[in-house]
Image (tube, helix red, strand yellow):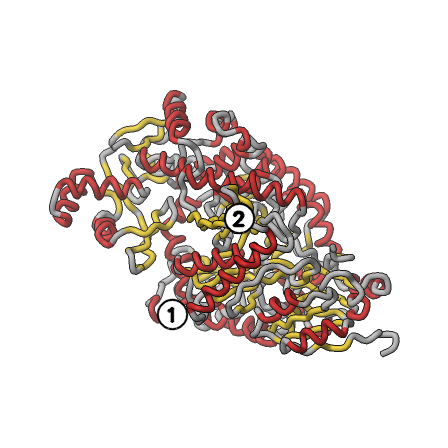
Amino acid sequence: MQIPLKLKWLGKETAEVCRSITPFHPLILISPAPQLSDRDVPENFVRLPHSICRLFDLNAQRSVQEEHDVYRSASQTDLRSSGAPCAFDVIEFKDDAQNFAALYEFYFEVFLKNSAVKGAPDAPDYQYIERFHSALLEHNFIALVRAFRDSQIVAGLLLRRPTAPEQFLNSIGVGKVAIVDVLSINSTRSTLANELVSRGAQWAREADYSFLSATPCSALVTTEHDWTIETASMLSWPEQPAALLYCDMHRCSYLSNDIYFYSLSDNEVALHYVANRRSGSETIRLLSSTPHIKKTIYTRHPDVSAALFAAGFHCEEVRDRCNG
Amino acid sequence: MQWLISTNEPEAVNAPILRHELLQAGIMREIVDHLPWYKKTRNMDLMLAKHLIHTIRSGFERSFVLREMERLDISADVAERFLNVLQEKGCCRFGEPRYFYSAVQFRGSFGKGVAVKGCYGKPVIISDALAECLRLLRGLILREQCEEMLAGFLGRKAYVEQAIQTLAGKGLLMSCDSAKTTVSDYGVLRWGVELQHDGQLLSHAAWEERLHFLEDSFQSNYFQSRNCFFEPPIELQGDLDTIARWGNAEYFWKVSFKLQSFDQPIPINLQAACLSAYEQWQELRLQSPTIFEWGLTLDLRRDRRGLIDELIAHLERRHYSYVIDVTLLLGDELPARLDHLCEFVRLKLHSTGKVQIPDLNAMSPALRHLVEQQLTAAREHEQNKLGHSLNINGCGDIHTGLLQNGICLGHISDGTNTIEQRRKSFRSETA
């Protein structure tokens, strides 16, 4: 589901344009927009960071037993969903012919095939191979985690270093950051994604990386859930032009997918979540992986509200604006 | 061991072998034609050239050059063949020059070794012993003298040969007949365009003249004609008071349309003698297209240190975005409160080379990093950067250098070929 309307900040006139079209669009994103003083932010708009990434602390304290259980439970789930276990390996990227060959094999056998079938709106635009060539030649890739089934490569996770514009990630503290650049799997409902990321996180931890980061993406998410791993996480945002969002919660609560966005107020990030889908397990997983920020959750489904309440999350009631 | 020597500039170190004329003639096809089918994409020659121009240069050892080519997924046989083609065309040869040359920056110790960066390469981590060898070999040293010095430190001749081979293989040790700076380069990398003339903003006719000149200049360049830029190719310059008084959103909208074909963000750098127009400028900035990246330049060469206090006062009010670029033109000393200023803005430091750098250990880590990267390093490579950045002032005259009062090379009406010839002569004279 695409964002219904996206505009660019053209000046103060943009606010006037937005006011006239809000009756027709429940979601309007103005991106990029400059950082505005409070008086210049259009009415009913929320300030968003231009893009956001989730950082997972790889050195967070976890018991060995817990770690073992994560892999075992994930594998069992995978058995149920796919009927066959997966084998994994990790190739650390060194500049030799063997590594290049492995990367191109992943590109042709996994990435191109999967993205042709379902696409990945937040993935890097490697559909055109020259962009992949360029990224390879810049030596930004760190490691490739591959999943095999019946000796065939079926999925992969590609890690890279922060680029120069992403160097803000270094400012968060001690340690190196590995970014998930490409996550390509051939199934939408498998837990293979989390399994791959867990393997990647384990490798990164052993290679002295302190944080694992999702690729910086739009602060507004309107598609399926992305992956999480079971460690404490924190959020970070780059110093780029911000974005503004108009979101009519009542009308958005009738959409088919969940919507969530990270708002920015007084340099603090908050998560706003509109829970529309009836299955709450992925919602709970995502909400649990962001323990350090303020969360506001909206839903019009009583069963979803009950499930979230049982998991320790309180939902706000969505009111029709016309009825107050 | 075999060391690369440029036929065109045999006396220079780090002279480019893949010269501009060679690239324009299509030399990269000698590699691309031998790559797998999926690598024969439209811009593969450009992508490879962008990386190879930094390593196929005089002074490097053959094994280093071949290894760097293999890091670009070019097979060993294709790499060897390419070097042979370059020799056959008379672009270069391999030999054993008289001197060893080393110019590295030491980046700090790690548990497993020392991080160093050669002037012309990427940072690498080497052992403590090799780092000590590099400390002994700074600058230009006769080959025999170098071997004696290393033998005194390492003890055995076999170790000396191994150390030289290892350092050469990492690109940290070069060999040349002199350390003369190369004159060859890849053209003007950045054009500064002044936004005002006689106290007014540039007219439409003046913009058309400049655009015509810039388009000609870019078209004649192998990289820029294909939208490959090593840094932002155009920077707009002006005076804060003039821009705040005469500038409006509509004017900058039109300018953005004129420049959008260059497909790059455009820095606008405003020189400020005082900051009374700061708020007005911020309003203009909010209404202008986001293609422009606004920044301020404060000239501190004539003791205007009160400017920093004034700027910090504006920033602390937090009425607008505080993430702007601020360039300081420094005089003899570093001004106070730079640590505080660093917290609000992206700071850049420029110096003509006379600034006295105080004790780095007394600075905050952020400021120390800035001073090391922008002042200390810049001093060592200033010579190499001469003529890479030209400015077009309000009258259409073209001057050299990032700072004002550079050498005048002519007028835009002289045409790009004439200006380029004069620029090359300027580089030859100052090399």
Q: Residues within 10 Å of mark 2 (few under 14, many from 20)?
A: many
Residue name at image x 27 percent, y 29 percent: B95
Return the x and y of residue B324 as percentages of the image width and height.
57, 63
- Spot the residue most to the top: B88
> Badge 1 is on which residue?
B363
**Residue shown at 44% from the left, 68% from the top:** A65
Relative depth, front residue between B65 and B148: B65
> What amino acid does circle 1 point to?
Met
Provide residue B21's location: percent of width, then percent of height. 48, 28
Say if residue A321 shows up in the picture: yes
Q: In the visual, does B286 lie left or right of B151?
A: right
Which residue is at a point 73% across and 77% down the rendered structure image? Answer: A316
Name the quadrant containing residue B431. Answer: top left
Q: Residue farthest to the right?
A: A322
Local packing at callout 1 (Cα closer than 10 Å; few below 14, some 14-19, many 20+) is some
- Which residue in the structure is indicated by mark 2? A156
- Give the left or right position of residue A64, taking residue B221 as reference: left
> What element does badge 1 sit on?
loop
* CA–CA distance in space, label 2 to label 1: 45 Å
- Count of numbered tags: 2
Residue B22 visible, this orientation: no
Measured from the top left, where is residue B194 in percent x and y? 61, 51
Instruction: Determine whether B270 is above or below B363 in the image.
Output: above
Subunit of label 1: B
Specify the subunit that label 2 lies on: A
Instruction: Pinpoint residue A60: horizontal percent, then vertical percent.
Output: 45, 70
**Image position of B99 with respect to B317: above or below:** above
Q: Closer to the observer: label 2 or label 1?
A: 2
The quadrant the N terminus of chain B occupies is top left
